[in-house]
Image (spheres, rainbow, N blue to C red):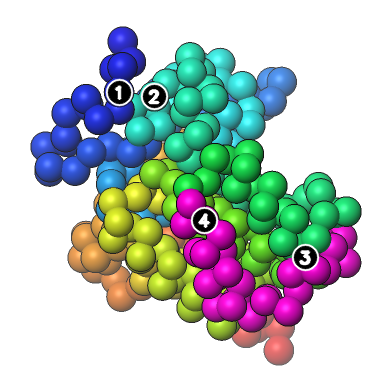
Amino acid sequence: MTPANPADLPPSPSGQREMLQIEGLSFAYGSRQILTDLNLLVSEGSVVGLIGPNGSGKTTTLRLAADLLPIRQGRVLVNGVDISREPLRAKSQLAFIPDSPYGFEHLTVQEYLNMYRLLQEGDSSYSERSQYHLVAMDMEHLVHDSLGSLSAGTRRKVAIAAAFSLAPPVLLFDEATSALDPETILVVEVALRRLAGHKRGLLIATQDLDFAERMCDLVYLLQDGRVIESGSPKALLSNYGVKSMREVFLELVGFSENLKKFDESFSRSL
């Protein structure tokens, strides 16, 4: 039974509350199985990464966790609230940053931020935080521009500013560094650490293995919709006797041998 108040949940053995719990999650598009019995936890104050090849189920996991896809098998708890049973209550405690933001092309940047605050019931500090994020991302001069007139990368920065300014208990972030310039990535990294430091739980899907190694306290590696490995980047490097998450990734997805064959073949052809 879902507790009357998420604060009634007991802390995890580590003393941290579980901000996001995904239990036994499976999902299929028709006959194509996307996720199979997925289990993962995001504790308060932690940055958790989802990494894996294209088609491994990262984005589907985030969309299910945000209630953007129907959960048919398994469950998702957002700060202790079952998102299938109490969707409005659960979604009031999370923000989702998609890989490719779309919609609301007719709104200006400022109108979009205002709408986001009202829809998500942002607190009184939202407007001030959003202005800080606009300045940090060098977008304060764009507040009167329509979203439809902006590049894909700039629109993504607006979506990031809106979600970060909400400072929700749970943040879901798809392809964290996609379409972002190096300066914005630095701002994103600082903001993620600030949010984690205030006991938020962050789940980030990323193809950027260097970013995952720098930022994540814990990573789950998906392949064909299943978790094939998990742990802190430091522990994984130690366990596999390698120097980077790239090497861990190549080893786990079985691409190391393919890469060697490609290198040998390419060398012979020159």
User: Real-space Cα distance between discs 3 and 2?
Assistant: 34 Å
Which mark is first along the chain, 3 or 1?
Answer: 1
Residue pictured at 62% horizontal, 42% vertical: 118
Q: What number of labels is visible?
A: 4
Q: Give yes or no for contact between labels 3 and 4 (Cβ–Cβ under 8 Å).
A: no
> Looking at the picture, which amino acid does disc 1 mark?
Asn
Q: In the visual, does 105 lie left or right of 266?
A: right
User: Which residue position holds label 2?
Assistant: 81
Q: In the visual, does 264 lie left or right of 235?
A: right
Q: Position of residue 93 (x, y in %)?
A: 45, 37
**SS for tag 4?**
helix
Q: Nearer the viewer, mark 1 or mark 3?
A: 1
Q: Give yes or no for contact between labels 4 and 1 (Cβ–Cβ under 8 Å).
A: no
Q: Give yes or no for contact between labels 1 and 3 (Cβ–Cβ under 8 Å).
A: no
> Looking at the picture, which amino acid does disc 4 mark?
Tyr
* Of residues 268 and 163, the one drawn nearer to the viewer in this rendering: 163
User: Real-space Cα distance between discs 1 and 3?
Assistant: 39 Å
Which mark is first along the chain, 2 or 1?
Answer: 1
> Looking at the picture, which amino acid does disc 2 mark?
Val
Q: Nearer the viewer, mark 1 or mark 2?
A: 1
**SS for tag 1?**
loop
User: Which residue position holds label 1?
Assistant: 5
Asked where in the image residue 143 lies, by quadrant, the reply is: bottom right
* Of residues 16 and 69, the one drawn nearer to the viewer in this rendering: 16
Which mark is first along the chain, 4 or 2?
Answer: 2
* Of residues 98 and 28, the one drawn nearer to the viewer in this rendering: 98
**SS for tag 2?**
strand
User: Real-space Cα distance between discs 2 and 4?
Assistant: 24 Å
Task: Using the image, tell me which numbered label, if any, was put on residue 126.
Answer: 4
Residue pictured at 12% horizontal, 42% vertical: 15
Q: Which residues are magenta?
A: 124-149
